[in-house]
Image: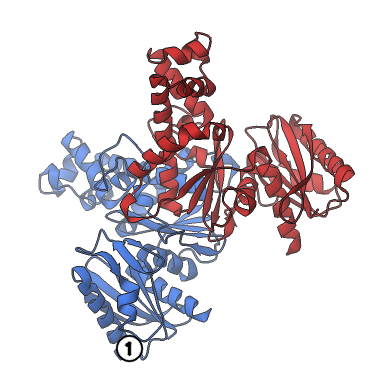
Chain colours: A red, B blue
Amino acid sequence: MVAAGIDVGGTKCLGVAVDAAGRVMAECRRPTPRGEAVIDALAGVAEDLEAEAGPLPALGVGVPGLVTLEGVLRASPNIPDVAELDVAGRLGARLEMPLVVGNDATWAVLAEWRIGAGRGHDDVVMVTLGTGIGGGVVAGGRLVVGANGFTGEFGHMVVDPNGPPCPCGRRGCWERYASGSGLAQLARIAAVGGRLRRVVEMAGGDAALVRGEHVQAAAREEDEAALAVVDEFARWVAIGLVNLTNALDPAMFVLGGGLAEGADLYLDPIERWFVSLLYSPQLRPHPALAFAELGERAGAIGAALAAAERTRR
Amino acid sequence: MVAAGIDVGGTKCLGVAVDAAGRVMAECRRPTPRGEAVIDALAGVAEDLEAEAGPLPALGVGVPGLVTLEGVLRASPNIPDVAELDVAGRLGARLEMPLVVGNDATWAVLAEWRIGAGRGHDDVVMVTLGTGIGGGVVAGGRLVVGANGFTGEFGHMVVDPNGPPCPCGRRGCWERYASGSGLAQLARIAAVGGRLRRVVEMAGGDAALVRGEHVQAAAREEDEAALAVVDEFARWVAIGLVNLTNALDPAMFVLGGGLAEGADLYLDPIERWFVSLLYSPQLRPHPALAFAELGERAGAIGAALAAAERTRR
């Protein structure tokens, strides 16, 4: 084992110990508590990993939200009652090994780039389509973290300034359309308009209860109204990917998050819209679109790889 | 002198010879011809520079448009009758010195970062607000060129998918709003609505002839309707800057292009809108906004610096 990594999710803290090739040698999980108790949970997972795999040469931790370069979690949409939590300081005081703390999506793109769907490319953008949208950037063969550690907050790129309000306080953020909750919202609007009979049926007859999985299930039955919602959703996904391509010219997008499970349904329409929205599509190679390979372990593996790389320097 | 650089603009090819600190030791210009004759003009400017400053140890060339990593100009909005022009190959066959060919805005950000408004920062995004919008990215202390050399095509980020058509074939591209032509368009819409009496007067009484400079001039007289157009324009500029901040978390934006001349008019409203549109503005340092310092020479100086850096390796 060269290092361990822990990914803090909304429901669980997932820890892994990896070898030099990023292969998982041991895995442990504990529930994510509210507030500062998350530090206890992290120390607990580290102990569990040590008990299973031996002393940890280095530990990486990935947390969702705005994490400073010093490892302070300023705020997190996924962990209740946490603000300005000095994860690096508090956890470092309790553990002996070298510690690296960063954003979960940043570590996920590191893992997918080193050993997952993005391997072999120098310019990779990962976009995580979950409840919201996060992600990370590799450019010129290096992980981009930004001036404050805040790269990859793609979900709050404004793609429609007069669009629906976002809980963040602004309007028309990309994640209002292209995330899991965005898909559900597009579906509910269509359902209220009366267009989505089969989908509403699957949601128990109540349009207000329609969720993304109902759209997916109906679309798999080739229900035309559901496929139209999938197509509209794919257009919004493509708008953000096109904007990132115009800005960053990646060789590849790695798509992760819950929606990656419906990959077969989304890939074709996203690619079709992408080509029709890209600037000068006939004059440039298009970035490959692939779905993440490391699943829920990407963040933890990436945190471990980051800890191993930082320690080697 | 350590290297020379030539920037190909819509009207002229501007060449400079620089010392190791990027200071301009000599400067020459020739008109930009149509089509492939641009190669002759480039060779001519190189000769002029040699005659003035002595043998050129290395030459960098910046061209507007999509330039591949091999130095092929695939197409250019600013040079008529050019397509798939192998600038590196054709010019390299005529010159003795090492040659680097790339995008003009990429070289401009390199120059502003090394010796201009962005010096001292590791994460700098330059945005050039001219007829269209271009730019470049420095991340983690390195120039980002992208998988194909096409980073920084910011003008075609889609910020309003149902917005007005763009000559590129899509709708609601950022440069439809936030460029020089975008400002004029916002003004003409307001003028047709009857709101812009003073501005239309300055344009000779014809709303169709209103240009950005008329808005600027009226705004400087504190004309309220003109100031409202400036404010609307600033909002659109801020939308794109916010999107780039969410994606890349730069320490600083360097704004260049023709609109940089009205810097005093735009800086305050852009900053105000930026704060109101940024995700979690209270939780993060805001990137500094500054206007470019190297003016029309940025591209040529950056091309020279790129040639010098590539030769040193």
Where's residue A149, x and y in %? 61, 50
Q: Which residue corresponds to mark 1?
A: B50
- Horizontal relation, residue A91 to residue B90: left or right: right
The image quarter in which residue A72 lies? top right
Identity of the residue drawn at 57% across and 30% down: A131
Say above or below: B150 vs A103. below
What residue is at 41 percent from the left and 67 percent from the top? B107
Task: Give the residue displayed 42% in from the left and 57% down from the top.
Answer: B151
Q: How many marks?
A: 1
Query: Dot 1 surroundings within 10 Å: few (below 14), some, or many (20 or more)?
Result: some
Residue A207 in picture, x, y percent from top left: 47, 12
Q: Position of residue B16 (x, y in %)?
A: 35, 79
The reply to whether residue A149 is visible in this rendering is: no
Residue type (three-letter) at the residue carrying disc 1: Glu
Q: Quadrant of residue B201?
A: top left
Q: Nearer the viewer, residue A113 or A40?
A: A113
**How far from the left and from the top, in percent, is residue B19?**
44, 83
- Identify the secondary structure beneath mark 1: helix
Extreme front residue here?
A: A221
Q: Is residue B87 among the parts visible in the rendering?
A: yes
Quadrant placement of the N terminus of chain B: bottom left
A98 and A218: which one is in front?
Answer: A218
Q: Chain of mark 1?
A: B
Furthest toward the left, the residue is B205
